[in-house]
């Protein structure tokens, strides 16, 4: 199983609601440290920001504000 693909899929389908780190850890059945590494890899691969919403503490994919 490709954990990066699973991570991308679950964050995408969560839409604007996003997912908490705890939810992602449970879905991927991985330790927090590994999940944070996967989030950083995905962030680099897609030149998008995967950001935590400080109000809800959930993760969502948003379009990059940086022009290449």
Image (cartoon, grey):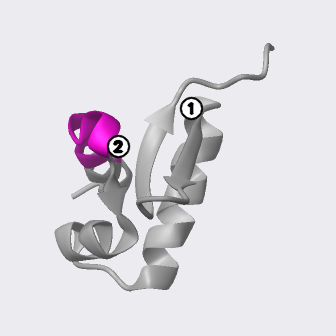
The x and y percentages for residue 60 are 42, 44
Residue 32 in sight from this viewpoint = yes
Q: Classify residue 47 as left or right of residue 26.
A: right
Q: Which residues are magenta?
A: 8-17
Q: Is residue 27 above or below residue 58?
A: below
Q: Which residue is mark 2?
A: 8
Q: Classify residue 5 as left or right of residue 45.
A: left
Q: State the CA–CA distance, disc 2 to disc 1.
A: 10 Å
Q: Quadrant of the N terminus?
A: bottom left
Q: Which residue is mark 1?
A: 46
Instruction: Name the outermost residue toward the top.
Output: 67
The x and y percentages for residue 52 are 52, 56
Residue drawn 51% across the image and 31% down it = 62
Residue 11 forms part of the magenta stretch: yes
Q: Nearer the viewer, residue 18 or 42?
A: 18
Q: Nearer the viewer, residue 30 or 20?
A: 20
Q: Secondary structure at mark 1?
A: helix
Residue drawn 71% across the image and 22% down it = 65
| Mark 1 burial class by Cα count in 10 Å: few <14, some 14-19, many 20+ | few
| Mark 2 burial class by Cα count in 10 Å: few <14, some 14-19, many 20+ | some
Q: Which secondary structure class fits the magenta region best?
A: helix
The x and y percentages for residue 56 are 41, 60
Q: Nearer the viewer, residue 58 or 56?
A: 56
């Amino acid at each position: 199983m490709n954990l990066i693909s699973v991570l991308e899929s679950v964050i995408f389908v969560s839409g604007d609601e996003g997912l908490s780190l705890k939810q992602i850890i449970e879905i991927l059945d991985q330790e927090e440290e590994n999940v944070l590494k996967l989030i950083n890899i995905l962030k680099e691969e897609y030149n998008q920001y995967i950001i935590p919403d400080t109000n809800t503490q959930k993760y969502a994919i948003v379009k990059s504000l940086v022009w290449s």
